[in-house]
Image (cartoon, grey):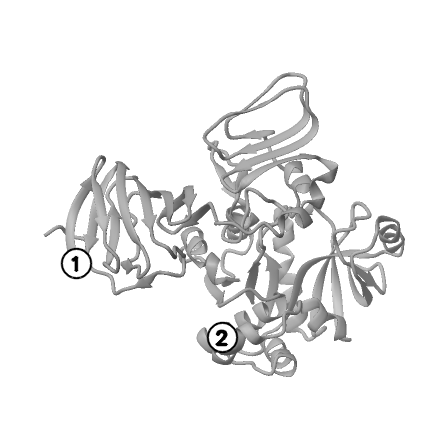
Amino acid sequence: MQLILLSGGSGKRLWPISNDLRSKQFIKIFKTADGQYESMLQRVMRQLAGTNADIPITVAASKSQETVLKKYLGDRADISSEPCRRNTFPSIALACAFLHDVRSVPLDEPIVVCPVDPYVDDQFFSRFVELANLIANDEASIVLMGIAPTYPSEKYGYIIPSTSDPISGVVEFKEKPDAPTAQKYIDQGALWNGGVFAFKLGYVLEQAEKILGVRTHEELLENYSALENISFDYAVVEHEKNIKVVRYVGEWKDLGTWNTLTEVMETNFIGDVRADDSCRNVHVINELDVPIVCLGLNDIIASASPEGILISNREHSSYIKPLVENIHQQIMFAEKSWGTYKVIDVERDSLTIKVTLNAGSRMKYHSHERRREIWNVIEGRGLIVVDGAVSSIGAGDVIELPLGCKHMVIADSDLKIIEVQLGAEISVEDKTIHESVGGSKK
């Protein structure tokens, strides 16, 4: 058995704390026993370690997420990196080809696919073995996990099973309905489609060849941007006759909207938030360095980050996407394997960023062809390498990096730098990676 976790998301429904680089699975909102906060991804990986510690994991994600995934996953999982965003079928096909062509996983291996960020109890993950066993025993070509619904949701697709048994055939699938229609489905015994399913590895590679015209890892990578943008449900599931569903009864939430996210927050306020006693059912996440003060509010969700500020009635927070999907701006905050960066000023020919490197981390050795940089070290100590020359740096140092020079930083302690980028065409694509050099001072 192999597990593929789908790490997608464009960050629109949880704007402004999420963006294209920082999808919802990386947002730290769950309080741990030691008082720290963990992300959805960290929570799921912790649960998997307790229920399926020996199952190999591959995370299917866009290339833009690769750095932060490596930061959190370490050696616990492989990453199948998409060259660009596509829908779930190309993503799953690429991950399956990676497992077969790169990791030599046999074609008859059961594969379980799950989103990377469900909010569930541990028994949810324990059921994965059951799905895999049904596939291994040729009970069906695809086995789905159907979630017993708790209310007539308009956000999920529905699976209509043929019986009320724990394991059943499938009559049909229904797309996201309105609430009255959803209730009719539930009265018929319908289950939510939670995006969890299993199949044999070779089955999806055959489907990839039939539907996409390619099946090897190399072919998929080379043609990825031209592949059909289609979901696994539309491409495969809805056309498959030999299919079964396993009923799951237990806690399950898709934390894809502000309303559902705040339902599981253990505290009403994260960050510097002040509220008087008259506030009722108010949740605020503040990632800015200024306080938010709330007075006399009821049923309000608010969030402030470098990307923007949201203030919404709780009921209407689920309808945010149309208002923000056309916001096209500089990504203002991102996590990297070495730390974080936060944009603090944007001008026509300059960009000012606060860079924080974690102790013991280093940037990749790189250069820029269309911008020069000025670095002001404001805290910590470390080494800087410029065109092969290594020097010590510390608070108060100012370093000028000419156009085209190769450079990187190595942090001895937590290191904070104000980086000013200067140029007429400042772009994240303007970066050339070079072979790394040593970090010993000469």
Q: Is residue 296 left or right of residue 347?
A: right
Residue at left offset 64%, top offset 37%:
262
Determine whether 237 is above or below 358 in the image. Answer: below
Residue at left offset 61%, top offset 45%:
14
> In the rendered image, which quarter is residue 358 located in?
top left
In the orientation shown, which residue stands out farthest toward the top? 277
Disc 2 residue type (three-letter): Leu
Q: Measured from the top left, where is residue 85 in percent x and y?
A: 55, 64
Q: Which residue is mark 2?
A: 221
Q: Measured from the top left, where is residue 283 in percent x and y?
A: 63, 31
> In the rendered image, which quarter is residue 129 located in?
bottom right
Which tag is nearer the camera, tag 2 or tag 1? 1
Disc 1 residue type (three-letter): Gly
Q: Which residue is mark 1?
A: 388
Task: Return the disc, 2 or 1, that comes first in the chain's sequence.
Answer: 2
Image marks 2 and 1: residues in contact by CB distance under 8 Å: no
SS under mark 1: loop
The alpha-carbon separation of the residues under discs 2 and 1 comes to: 34 Å
Q: Measured from the top left, where is residue 253 in percent x and y?
A: 68, 47
Q: Measured from the top left, where is residue 188 in percent x and y?
A: 89, 56
Residue at left offset 13%, top offset 50%:
441
Q: Is residue 26 left or right of residue 139?
A: left
Q: Residues within 10 Å of mark 1 (few under 14, many from 20)?
A: some
